[in-house]
Image (cartoon, coloured by chain):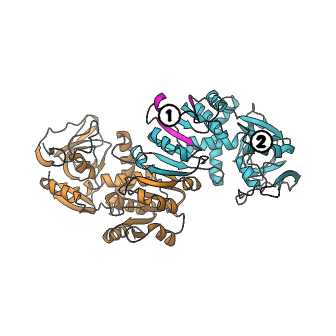
Chain colours: A orange, B cyan
Amino acid sequence: MKAIHIQNPGRNSSLVIDEAPTPKPASNDILVKVKATALNRADLLQRSGNYPVPEGASEILGLEMSGVVEQVGAEVTKWQSGDRVFGLLAGGGYAEYCTIHKDMAMEIPESLSFEEAAAIPETFLTAFQTLDWLGELQEKETVLIHAAGSGVGTSAIQLAHHLYDAKIIGTAGKQHKLNTAQKLGANFAYNYKEQNYAEEIINDIGTDSVNLIVDFIGKPYWHKNMEILAMDGRVVYLSFLGGHKVEEISLVPILRKRLSIMGSTLRNRSEAYKKKLTQDFASQTLTLFEDGKLQPVIDSTFDWSDTEKAHQHMQNNKNTGKIVLTGM
Amino acid sequence: MKAIHIQNPGRNSSLVIDEAPTPKPASNDILVKVKATALNRADLLQRSGNYPVPEGASEILGLEMSGVVEQVGAEVTKWQSGDRVFGLLAGGGYAEYCTIHKDMAMEIPESLSFEEAAAIPETFLTAFQTLDWLGELQEKETVLIHAAGSGVGTSAIQLAHHLYDAKIIGTAGKQHKLNTAQKLGANFAYNYKEQNYAEEIINDIGTDSVNLIVDFIGKPYWHKNMEILAMDGRVVYLSFLGGHKVEEISLVPILRKRLSIMGSTLRNRSEAYKKKLTQDFASQTLTLFEDGKLQPVIDSTFDWSDTEKAHQHMQNNKNTGKIVLTGM
C-alpha cells in the first residue's frame, strides 16, 4: 500500500507518499480502506521528533480515520466487508489501509460523509471524556469552556448543549471564534483579550456559579477559575497553553467549595479505557450526529498529496476546526 | 430533659447542664435516649462563637452519639423501642435525648459498648468518605495518610487495611503516634520532624508510587505530594493545619500524571448525601466492627458533668483518639 513517510524527522522534516507494508488485522481487528484522516497537533510534534510513538503503535502518522471495512479478523462478527466505520487510532491514518480493534471502530451515521466522520474522533472523544467521564457534567449545570474556538472547544460546546442542556460559557481571543461558539450553543461568550471573564461571569450569572471548567490555558486563569467555581465545582486541565507555573495559590477554595482539580489526556490512556470510552460515546451521540444536531467543525480538506501544505496551515494557526486529508 | 448549654459564647464561655425541651421526632425520625457522645474540634469552635450552627440543626453541641431508641416517628418501621443505635448528628448529642432520621442511625454491633459506638461516626465516616467515595481507593493500592495519629487518620488506616488491603504509609510528628499507626495496619511510618517523607517513600517504594493521599496539612506538603503521586493519583484535602498558601506551583504533574486534587468536608453535606454515606458505610463495615477488626481509638471517657474538663483536654491537644462523654 501507499502511506505518508516522514523524511529527516526533526526541524527539516518532509512528508512523502511511498510504499509501506499493508497492515494485517489481528483476530479481533478489522482492516479498513482509509477514505479520510484528520490532522492533530501531535502529528506536527511527531514529525519534528518531539512526540515518541507509543509502544506497539504504528510509526505512520494519523490518529483518527474514516473508511470502509476491507477484511475482518478471525473472531470479528460485528463488522463485515463494506461497512463504513470511523474511530481513533494509535497511529496509521495517513495511509491507504489501517487496522483498528473491532471495539474501537464506530459505524458512520448515514448522513455523514467520510470527511466529516474523520474529523470527529479526537476532538469529540476528548470533549466527551472531559465533560462526562471526568467532569461528570449534570443536566442544566453551568460549564465554562476556554479556547471555545478550538477543535475540542467546539466539540465540548455542542456536547454540553445537546447531552446536558447546560448553561455554556465560552472564552476565546477572536470575535469569529466567539460567534462560532454562540452558534454552536454557548449562552455567553467573552473575549479574554478585552474582558475579564471572571468579572463578566459574576455580573451575568453570579458568584460561585460555574460547575465545571474545561481549561487549556493554565497559569493565567488559575485565580479567576478559583473565584467563579461553584460548590462541588470541577476543573479539567487538557493543556497549559498559557504556562504552567502559578506564583502563589491558596488552597482554601479547594476545601471551602469542595473542588476537584483534574488533568487528563486521551492518547496515553490504556486500550481498554479507549474502547469503553468509544462505546459509551457512540451510544450517546451517534443518533445526534445522524440528526445533524452534532457536527464536526471542518476548517479545510486537502488531498493527501498536499499533506505538507495541510501541516503548514496548522503550523501557522490558520485553522478554526479540523483539517481533513482525503484521496488516499 | 437535661442538656449542656453554652453560657457566654465566646472567649469566656462555660458549659452547664440545664433544662431543655425534649426534642420531638418527626414522622421519619427516632427519639434516642443518649448513652454517650464524643467531642469534635467543631464543638470548641462553636462554643467560642466561630462555628455557625447550620440551618435547621440543634443549637446543642454534639455531632455524634450512641443510645437506645425511646420512641419512633409515625412512618418508621425499621427501628423499635429498645434498639441500640448510633450515628452522626447535625447537633444535639450533649443531651439526655436527641432525634435522628431513621436512615442516619446505624445498629450498634453487639460486641461494642455505647462508649465505643459513640466514638465511631465522625472519624470513620469522614475517613470512609475520603478513601471510598472521593479517593476511590482500589484493592492493593498505596495510600499515604498524613496526621496518622489523628482520629480520622487512625480510622483511615484501619479502613485502608481491612477494606482495600492497601499498602499504607503514615506520617506523624511523635513516635507513639507512629507506633499506633503501625499497630493499626500502616506498613510504613515516617516522622515528618526527622525525615523527608517524600525521599523515604521514593527509597522504600519507588517514584510515582502513591495512588491516594489523605492530607490535613496543606502548604508544606504540596510539592512533596506532587513528587510521589502515581499516574492517576488523587489527593483529598480535609484541612490545612500547616497553612494554605503555596508559593510557586507547577501544574505540570496534574496533567502529566492525570491527577485529581480534591477538598472535602462532611458536616456541610446535604442530608441526602449523609444518609447514603451512612448506609454505604454501615453495609461495608459493621461486621468488621463486630469482629473487632475495626475499632475506634478512644483517648478517654468523661462523665458529662465534667464536659468542661474534657474540652480543656482537647483544647490542650492532649488526646490521641476520641474523647467520649457518658452519664447523661
Amino acid, disc 2: His
Q: Is residue A102 magenta?
A: no
Q: Which residue is mark 2?
A: B313
- In the rendered view, does B136 fall on the left or right side of B107? left
Residue toward you, A52 or A98 = A52
Compute the Cα span from label 2 to label 1: 36 Å
Image location of residue B125, percent across then percent down: 65, 43
User: Looking at the image, is B194 positioned above or below residue A81?
Assistant: above
- Mark positioned earlier in the residue sequence (2 or 1): 1
Image location of residue A38, percent across then percent down: 23, 53
Amino acid, disc 1: Glu
Q: Quadrant of residue A303?
A: bottom left
Image location of residue B289, percent across then percent down: 68, 32
* Mark 1: secondary structure: loop
User: Looking at the image, is A70 positioned above or below residue A242?
Assistant: above
The magenta segment: B187-216
Disc 2: host chain: B
- In the rendered view, does A248 fall on the left or right side of B184? left
Image location of residue B325, percent across then percent down: 80, 42
* Mark 2: secondary structure: helix
Instruction: Give the class, few, some or many, for how many residues have Cα within 10 Å of label 1's Cα (few <14, many ≥20).
Output: some
Observer-side mark, 2 or 1, equals 2
Residue drawn at (52%, 35%), measured in percent from left and top? B196
Which image quadrant: the C terminus of chain B? top right
Q: Is residue B190 magenta?
A: yes
- In the rendered view, does A30 fall on the left or right side of B36? left
Disc 1: host chain: B
Q: Which residue is mark 1?
A: B141
Residue toward you, A199 or A209 = A199
